Image (spheres, grey):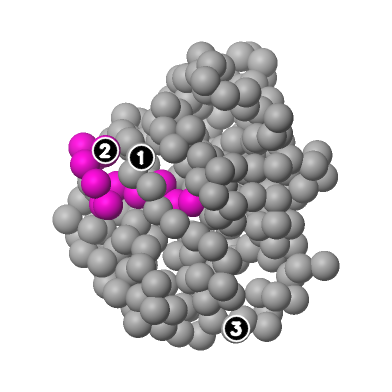
Amino acid sequence: MKKILLIIPAYNEEKNIVKTVEAIKKYKKIKLDYIVINDGSIDNTKKVMEENDINFIDLPFNLGIGAAVQTGYKYALYHNYDIAIQFDGDGQHDINSVDKLIEPIINDDYDMVVGSRYIDNTSSFKSTFSRRAGIKVISFLIKMLSKKVLKDVTSGYRAVNKNIIEVFANYYPYDFPEPITNYALLKMGYKCKETGVNMFEREGGVSSIRALKSIYYMFNVCLSILLFNNKIFKGGVK
């Protein structure tokens, strides 16, 4: 049986984290472990997790989404997990889509599967217009550079196999990690695909990518992809 870990980055998620973890615990289709990475939250996230006996790693201060997720991958590598799944702590990801994410890895030997809102109608929530526009631009750039298509390039709902766990444990960008690592894996020839998943609209807290930042985010992601250094990424693998 495959060992599967959910990596849950959390920053100021006191209103969402208990509900998120409870949904995971109720999921019985597949045996799952989880670890919450508390990224230096300044609200009561840590206290809430302690009071509800939630498994977590506490970072000393806010390192950002990339460092938080990489901490989860280091944990997965150290504990010899076969599959790791990124899962947001804000309640946006539907745990009932997990089986769709891991099935291609187990059955078809894919290295990474991206949970997508845009390849079918599985998810009724599609994000804001400004963010969708930015995602389309980033997706187009990745297609031009890699000759491969990923539509939901900023999706944080992803599953990876043991090979990619090791890659990400050793190197993971702190800024814009999902689109950059998606592009990197495609460019390096790893087997990646998208599958339709369900996502919900955030119920509480504040998204790290708000409408006013969407254009700035898109511009910086595109610049980072254009400046991407394949050798640096490979250098992160032992």
Name the residue carrying label 1.
197
What kind of residue is marked 2?
Answer: Thr
Q: Main secondary structure of the magenta part?
A: loop
What kind of residue is marked 3?
Answer: Asn
- Of residues 3 and 85, the one nearer the viewer is 3
Q: Classify 10 Å Cα crowding around label 1: few (below 14), some (14-19), many (20 and above).
A: many
Name the residue carrying label 2.
122
Residue 195 appears at what percent x and percent y?
38, 47
Of callouts 2 and 1, the N-terminal one: 2
On whether residue 119 falls in the magenta region, the answer is yes
The reply to whether callout 3 and callout 2 are in contact (CB within 8 Å) is no
The reply to whether callout 3 and callout 1 are in contact (CB within 8 Å) is no
Name the residue carrying label 3.
229
Of callouts 3 and 2, the N-terminal one: 2
Q: Classify 10 Å Cα crowding around label 3: few (below 14), some (14-19), many (20 and above).
A: few
The CA distance from mark 3 to mark 2 is 35 Å
Residue at 71% from the left image edge and 30% from the top image edge: 1
Disc 1, SS: loop
Instruction: Examine the rendering and report whether any part of residue 176 can be seen.
Output: no
Residue at 60% from the left image edge and 36% from the top image edge: 6
Disc 3, SS: loop
Of callouts 3 and 1, the N-terminal one: 1
Relative to 63, does residue 157 appear above or below in the rendering? above
